[in-house]
Image (spheres, grey):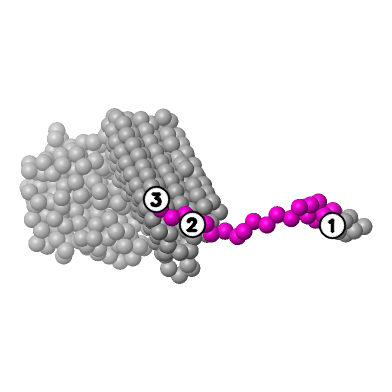
Amino acid sequence: MSVSLVILAAGMGTRMNSDMPKVLHHVAASPLLHHAMLAGQSLSPDRTVVVVGHGAEQVGKAAKAFDEGAVIVVQDEQKGTAHAVAQAAPLLADASGDVIILYGDTPFIRPETLAAMHVARKKHAIVVLGFHAADPGRYGRLIASGDTLEKIVEFKDASDAERAVTLCNSGVICADAKALFDLVSAVEPNNAASEYYLTDIVQIARSRGLSSGIVLCPEAETMGVNTRAQLADAEREFQKRARAEALENGVTLTAPDTVFFAIDTVVGRDAIIGPNVVFGPGVTIESGAEIRAFCHLEGCHISRGATVGPFARLRPGAELAEDVHVGNFVEIKNAILDEGVKVGHLTYIGDADIGEHTNIGAGTVTCNYDGVMKHRTTIGKRAFIGSDTMLVAPVKIGDGALTASGSVITEDVPAEAVAIARAEQIVKAGLATKLLERLRAIKAKKGK
């Protein structure tokens, strides 16, 4: 049975006290919206419709960045969840199978839970995701008879008896596509908030002889983000899960509570991650690599046997082959380092290709930017770049070549050649004493 997704992401998020739409606030280095989209993608949906409103252009752009095929529809006025779903109806008028409704501010719904809802939908026209809350608070309540859902009651409309129920509504719904939009069109704003509640479709369905069911999940899975405090809670929950998964998969975390993963971090078995390592988006660490303390990595690939850090930064486009060593206070950006390359310390490598087993001395800089354009540096195999070499790109260093320490290299260096590009040293005996005496005399005169 095919699936389409409708992701509701139109809310302002007033309690975030932010100029930015709520769903664009980050957990695990990615917008909340991306977490919801990632969970939905596990079902290989035919179509994904994202309903936007506040900050529509920004939210739509973020959705497209995650899934180019996502369709964006604007809810100009926020009149409730049923009204939001109704905006997607024209885009899914010919859809078959199921529609799953997700929320851009609810990042932890698991793919397994969505799959269970999809299966349960074979027995019911509508399946609602519920959970037992330790503190039900203002959640909507699920009123059920056995495994059949009779109705959903919003807290403000619930009786005292209904408020005593601990079975709560997550808001996530799986329904037959044609039935869903037919039911949504019948919803009326007959409630305390004068809004079109999506939850009303359960009672409408029952009045038409259609059944509704419930799938349960742990309460933590339904965590929504409405405040900065909840955003921090969500980050903690994500990191807790990611660390546990890494350990279970055979990754060594020497100080787990200090490591921060991104939504898409991939770390192979027997890799070692030291303390205070932070992953941005797009990082893959192969088995047996080691990331030492206080490193920041994003958009990079690190191969088996490589070591990085401590105190290193790898930026997007950094590709480290097997047994590469990147040491302390080294930054790599948009550069390919072939097998066995060593970049020990205090170095910037940007927009470069470095051949196998080349050694880069301390303080080396690839001068890649001329103020307008970026230029590339190419260094061959088994070259030796002396400390404090400035490589002014575009420039090529041949296989087995050597640059003298303190050189500013502006022209290509042939294979196996030595390049020396520094001013001749001049030594004037006794001049230091004379200069210091003169300076002290000037200082004393000014002091008077």
Cα gap from disc 3 to disc 1, whole angstroms: 49 Å
* Residue at horizontal 32 percent and vertical 34 percent from the top: 288
User: Quadrant location of residue 78?
Assistant: bottom left
- Which dot marks residue 416? none
Q: Check disc 3: other Cα within 10 Å, few if <14, some if 14-19, many if 20+.
A: some
Secondary structure under tag 3 reads loop
> From the viewer's perspective, is the residue at label 3 or at label 1 nearer?
3
Amino acid at circle 1 = Arg
> From the viewer's perspective, is the residue at label 2 or at label 1 nearer?
2
* Residue at horizontal 11 percent and vertical 40 percent from the top: 120
User: Quadrant location of residue 136?
Assistant: top left
Q: Compared with residue 159, is residue 419 higher up or lower down, i.e. above or below?
A: below
Q: Check disc 2: other Cα within 10 Å, few if <14, some if 14-19, many if 20+.
A: many
Amino acid at circle 2 = Ala
Q: Label 1, on which residue?
A: 438
Q: Label 3, on which residue?
A: 400
Mark with earlier residue (3, 1): 3
Amino acid at circle 3 = Gly
Identify which residue, 67 or 424, lies in the foreground. Answer: 424
User: Residue 420: within the magenta?
Assistant: yes
Identify which residue, 126 or 204, lies in the foreground. Answer: 126
* Magenta-colored span: 416-438
Q: Label 2, on which residue?
A: 419
Does residue 11 appear in the picture of this structure?
yes
Furthest residue in direction bottom, as rendered:
372
Left or right, residue 68 beside residue 274: left
